[in-house]
């Protein structure tokens, strides 16, 4: 089996928008309620200088309407929280790690903020009603907010319903994986030459983790390469996404230019800060973790307690898509270059045999007695082998042989004949004649 060749490429951009969304949803919820208070206090007074528009209410009817809206929205916010909690419990039963990667649950905080903000707005406006005058525009806005809340809530519940199923979770992870692969393992790159391993220096000054322990989530390659280029240094990272980094752990080594001192002190800390460490693992720069999640969904569906091979097939659909994407990507050791084309950073990506093993071996083990899974795996291996370059086909050929052995393990000749067929849809049934 050939080793993955080294390759050079430019630095990849760090996915900052997804990280921002982690903090944005609670902030939007809080800002919505603050805006509701301000609008409820100010709008009734501004109406004196605005045209008389809106629904016609007498003060008593307006007060009753606002009270009903406030009470209904408070009840509805409790319903939303309960529904989200139930969905989270259902997802956790499939795999607790899925909660951390599915952003829909964080977006549900925005829905709660909108509904609660409407209730707060109605209560504040209610306090502004005077016996001799009704703030028509303010009451009309409260009614309009109820309509908006209803539309947003229905859309949110529709999305949550899709996540309750294993197939919906597999599709969500597959979408995130596609983005992760495209951002982390760009197509292209060039071979650096046969002398690159010999010319890359060993040893150097260690980059030490000084913050709290956690899981490496990613590397800000552009910033790290820029710092290294300014110091005329080269950096070798010995950790990658998914590795645990404790306080004092060595993240990598810095090599200065020949005959010159290596960076020290603050500059080393700046380089170390380019390695992002968080308590919870993420698949932003970690396609292997996405495969792990898909495998978790599949093998749980194949457990005797669940016995749901169709969900396992839906996970295999996403695994096939991921392996097809990965088959054409440069894997193994990457030399990341600066703007002048000089290699400044060495880091490693997962190797192809390990990715194939991670994606398929446990499913083959637990799904060996499932006709659906065996036949769908045969199609998957054919599709991935067609997309893979010749030097990456050996692990696939080995799995094809394993699928053949699984098919022959059925005792009845008819079941053997069925298992030796293919089923792209993974629905089961005898092969077409």
Image (cartoon, grey):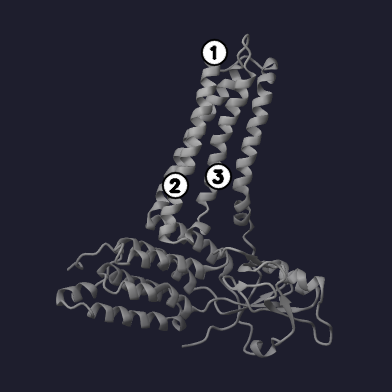
For the residues labelled 2 and 3, the Cα–Cα distance comes to: 14 Å
Q: Nearer the viewer, residue 397 or 70?
A: 70
> Which residue is under mark 1?
60
Which of the marked residues, 1 or 2, is nearer the chain's N terminus?
1
User: Whole-percent x and y of residue 247?
Assistant: 68, 72
Q: Is residue 342 visible?
A: no
Residue at 53% x, 23% y is 67
Q: Quadrant of residue 187?
A: bottom right
- The residue tagged with tag 2: helix, strand or loop? helix
- The residue tagged with tag 3: helix, strand or loop? helix
User: Whole-percent x and y of residue 166?
Assistant: 38, 58
How many labels were placed on the picture?
3
Query: Residue 10 vs residue 430: left or right?
Result: right
Q: Residue furthest right?
A: 260
User: Whole-percent x and y of residue 46?
Assistant: 69, 20
Above/below status of 354 relative to 134:
below
Q: Quadrant of residue 230?
A: bottom right
> Which residue is under mark 2?
159
> Which residue is under mark 3?
109
User: Whole-percent x and y of residue 251?
Assistant: 67, 76
Q: How busy is the neighbourhood of tag 1: few (under 14 within 10 Å), some, or many (20 plus)? A: few
Above/below status of 40 relative to 181:
above
């Amino acid at each position: 089996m050939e080793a993955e060749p080294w390759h050079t490429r430019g630095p990849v951009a760090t996915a900052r928008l997804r990280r921002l969304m982690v903090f944005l949803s609670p902030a939007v919820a809080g800002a919505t309620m603050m805006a509701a208070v301000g609008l409820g206090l100010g709008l009734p007074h501004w109406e004196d200088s605005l045209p008389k528009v809106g629904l016609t209410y007498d003060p008593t009817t307006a007060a009753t309407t606002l009270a009903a809206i406030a009470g209904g929205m408070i009840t509805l916010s409790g319903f939303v929280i309960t529904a989200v909690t139930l969905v989270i419990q259902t997802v956790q039963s499939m795999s607790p790690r899925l909660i951390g990667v599915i952003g829909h649950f964080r977006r549900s905080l925005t829905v709660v903020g909108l509904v609660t903000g409407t209730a707060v707005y109605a209560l504040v406006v209610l306090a502004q009603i005077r016996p001799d005058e009704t703030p028509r525009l303010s009451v009309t806005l409260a009614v309009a907010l109820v309509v908006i809340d209803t539309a947003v809530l229905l859309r949110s519940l529709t999305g949550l319903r899709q996540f309750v199923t294993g197939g919906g979770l597999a599709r969500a992870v597959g979408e995130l994986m596609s983005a992760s692969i495209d951002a982390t393992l760009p197509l292209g790159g060039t071979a650096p030459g046969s002398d690159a391993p010999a010319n890359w220096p060993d040893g150097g000054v260690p980059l030490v983790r000084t913050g709290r322990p956690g899981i490496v989530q990613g590397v800000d390659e552009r910033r790290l390469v820029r710092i290294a280029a300014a110091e005329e240094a080269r950096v070798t990272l010995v950790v990658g996404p998914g590795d645990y980094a404790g306080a004092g752990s060595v993240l990598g080594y810095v090599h200065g230019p020949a005959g010159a001192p290596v960076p020290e002190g603050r500059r080393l800390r700046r380089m170390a800060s380019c390695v992002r460490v968080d308590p919870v693992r993420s698949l932003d720069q970690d396609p292997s973790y996405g495969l792990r999640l898909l495998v978790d969904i599949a093998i749980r569906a194949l457990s005797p307690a669940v016995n749901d091979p169709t969900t396992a097939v839906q996970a295999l659909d996403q695994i096939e898509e991921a392996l097809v994407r990965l088959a054409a990507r440069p894997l193994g050791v990457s030399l990341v270059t600066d703007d002048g084309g000089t290699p400044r950073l060495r880091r490693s990506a997962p190797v192809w045999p390990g990715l194939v093993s991670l994606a398929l071996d446990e499913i083959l083990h637990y799904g060996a007695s499932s006709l659906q899974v065996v036949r769908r795996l045969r199609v998957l291996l054919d599709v991935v082998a067609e997309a893979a370059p010749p030097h990456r086909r050996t692990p696939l050929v080995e799995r094809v042989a394993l699928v053949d052995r699984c098919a022959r393990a059925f005792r009845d000749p008819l079941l053997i004949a069925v298992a030796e067929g293919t089923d792209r849809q993974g629905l089961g049934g005898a092969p077409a004649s």
